[in-house]
Image (tube, rainbow, N blue to C red):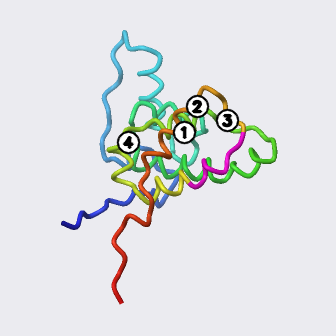
Amino acid sequence: MVRSVRRPSRPRDPTQSLERLQGQRWPEPPEDATSLVRAVHALRRRPVGDLRPEELARLITQDVGLPWLLPLAVRILRDTAPSQIAGGWYDDDLLYAVVTRKAQVWERFPELARELKATVETLVGLSRYVRGDVAAFCAAVPEESSRPKPTT
């Protein structure tokens, strides 16, 4: 049985908010909402291209807007990996948010999962707080070679 793979949706216009991309406006949070709930509601209204890594991490850990935000987060992680290898700063919060998404999420985006795996496998000296989660993520990502090879 051949399963169709749904590709991540990439916003054509990074000036659009998750509300607009998803076509769904959430009501205002209740008066007694936590600061997390208020923040998530507010971040959904901001242009996705303006979200900082820590804001992406906050939304991703809440499983909000994953088809749009995971590609952005993986790109940030990929683009900053070379500086981490050279001894620069690396965003453990964003890395943690991304690698701890459930396996079902990554099954929807296998190419993105392989790209992230290739990126994190280059990282050195990861924090002990995220090292185990990164290893578990890498172990769960199937190798590309497991796909059937075309016959000639």
- For label 4, the crowd category at 10 Å Cα-Cα, with few meaning under 14, some 14 to 19 and many 20 or more, is some
Question: Which residue bears the numbered disc 1?
Answer: 134
Disc 1 is placed on an element classified as helix
Q: Is residue 130 above or below residue 87?
A: above
Residue 129 x, y percent position in the rendering: 60, 26
How far apart marks 2 and 1 lie (CA) works out to 6 Å
Q: Marks 4 and 1: which is nearer the front?
A: 1
> What residue sits right under mark 4 in the picture?
19
Residue name at image x 44 percent, y 28 percent? 40
Q: Quadrant of residue 45?
A: top left
- Residue interval drawn in magenta: 118-124
Quadrant of the snapshot with the C terminus: bottom left
> Quadrant of the image for the N terminus?
bottom left
Q: Disc 1 to disc 3, how far (Cα)?
A: 9 Å
Q: Position of residue 50 (x, y in %)?
A: 58, 44
| Image coords of residue 139 (percent x, y) | 47, 45
Q: Which residue in the structure is indicated by mark 2?
A: 130
Q: Are marks 2 and 3 in contact (CB under 8 Å)?
A: yes
Q: Point out the frontmost of discs 4 and 2.
A: 2
Amino acid on which the number 1 mark rests in the picture:
Val
Instruction: Decide: is 152 above or below 27.
Output: below
Q: Which residue is mark 3?
A: 126
Question: Do the numbered discs 2 and 1 sit on residues whose CB atoms are within 8 Å?
Answer: yes
**The magenta stretch spans residue 52:** no
